[in-house]
């Protein structure tokens, strides 16, 4: 079977995680095939197909996330080394070179564009971030990952959800957190949508920064000073 061959190849390369996942997938395929030809009424005939399909699906999902993580990790080392050479503290460079967000991109472009938009030079940005706690910088990086470029490659200055962005540490304003803008107002600012089959509407709100303005102001509240201008 193809998955068995992949398992052997991965083991030969020392990639035991991938080898195990391919082996599981191959085992699931064997169960599915055996179940399809087994005598009716027996366990194998009844459960071989569903159990085998479940193993194949689980291993496929596992392989997707594992290979995705390996692919992203290829960029993190060189990025971290580059940032350290530029003058960033190792802890800060490690956070800034994190590619673990869903699309595999770096938060660097959004941070750099925001700083430039509001008058902070690359040198000022580095000096400011180097003084900060690495975990808070990680929080900022997580938020920067939510600011996406538009079709023309530009980061938006403002966004329609700016008023709905939650302030650090990102807790629901109705349950002890606050909004980034008008923090004294804890009323829900999103919208309600009907849910088929339910009497209770769903609350819909996007609390993440989607613009450079919201990212700048999130950083100001997070660090207690103007980091991004």
Image (tube, rainbow, N blue to C red):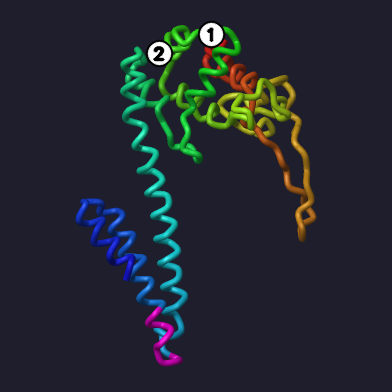
Q: Point out the stretch of residues depicted in magenta.
A: 33-41
Q: Quadrant of the N terminus?
A: bottom left
- Callout 1 environment at 10 Å: few (<14), some (14 to 19), or many (20+)? some
In the image, residue 207 above or below residue 12? above
Foreground residue, 171 or 95? 95
Q: Secondary structure at mark 2?
A: helix
Q: Say left or right for 90 vs 189.
A: left
Q: Quadrant of the C terminus?
A: top right
Q: Position of residue 140 (x, y in %)?
A: 51, 24
Q: Say left or right for 211 vs 195.
A: left
Quickly name the residue at label 2: 130
Q: Residue, x 41% and y 67% (percent of image)? A: 55
Q: Position of residue 213 (x, y in %)?
A: 64, 19
In the rendered image, is residue 177 in sight? no
Q: How many marks?
A: 2
Image quarter for residue 34? bottom left
- Callout 2 environment at 10 Å: few (<14), some (14 to 19), or many (20+)? some
Image quarter for residue 25? bottom left
In the image, residue 221 above or below residue 41? above
Q: Are marks 1 and 2 in contact (CB under 8 Å)?
A: no
In the rendered image, is residue 23 in sight? yes
- Residue 36 falls inside the magenta stretch: yes
- Residue 193 falls inside the magenta stretch: no
Q: Residue, x 34% and y 12% (percent of image)? A: 87
Query: Residue 120 got which mark?
Result: 1
Q: Position of residue 11 (x, y in %)?
A: 22, 57
| Mark earlier in primary sequence (1, 2) | 1
Foreground residue, 32 or 184? 32
């Amino acid at each position: 079977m193809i998955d068995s061959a992949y398992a052997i190849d991965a083991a030969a390369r020392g990639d035991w995680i991938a080898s195990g996942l391919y082996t599981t997938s191959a085992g699931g395929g064997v169960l599915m095939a055996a179940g399809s030809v087994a005598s009716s009424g027996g366990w194998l005939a009844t459960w071989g197909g569903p159990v085998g399909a479940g193993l194949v699906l689980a291993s496929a999902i596992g392989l997707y996330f594992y290979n995705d993580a390996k692919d992203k990790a290829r960029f993190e080392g060189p990025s971290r080394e580059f940032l350290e050479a530029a003058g960033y503290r190792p802890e800060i460079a490690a956070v800034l070179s994190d590619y673990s967000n869903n699309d595999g991109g770096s938060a660097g472009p959004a941070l750099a564009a925001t700083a430039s938009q509001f008058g902070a030079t690359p040198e000022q940005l580095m000096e400011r971030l180097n003084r900060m706690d690495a975990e808070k910088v990680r929080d900022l990086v997580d938020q920067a990952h939510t600011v996406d470029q538009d079709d023309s490659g530009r980061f938006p200055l403002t966004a329609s959800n700016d008023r709905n962005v939650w302030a650090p540490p990102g807790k629901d304003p109705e349950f002890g957190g606050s909004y980034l803008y008008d923090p004294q107002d804890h009323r829900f600012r999103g919208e309600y949508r009907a849910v088929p089959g339910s009497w209770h509407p769903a609350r819909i709100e996007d609390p993440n920064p989607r613009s450079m303005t919201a990212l700048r102001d999130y950083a100001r509240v997070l660090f207690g000073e103007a980091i991004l201008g």
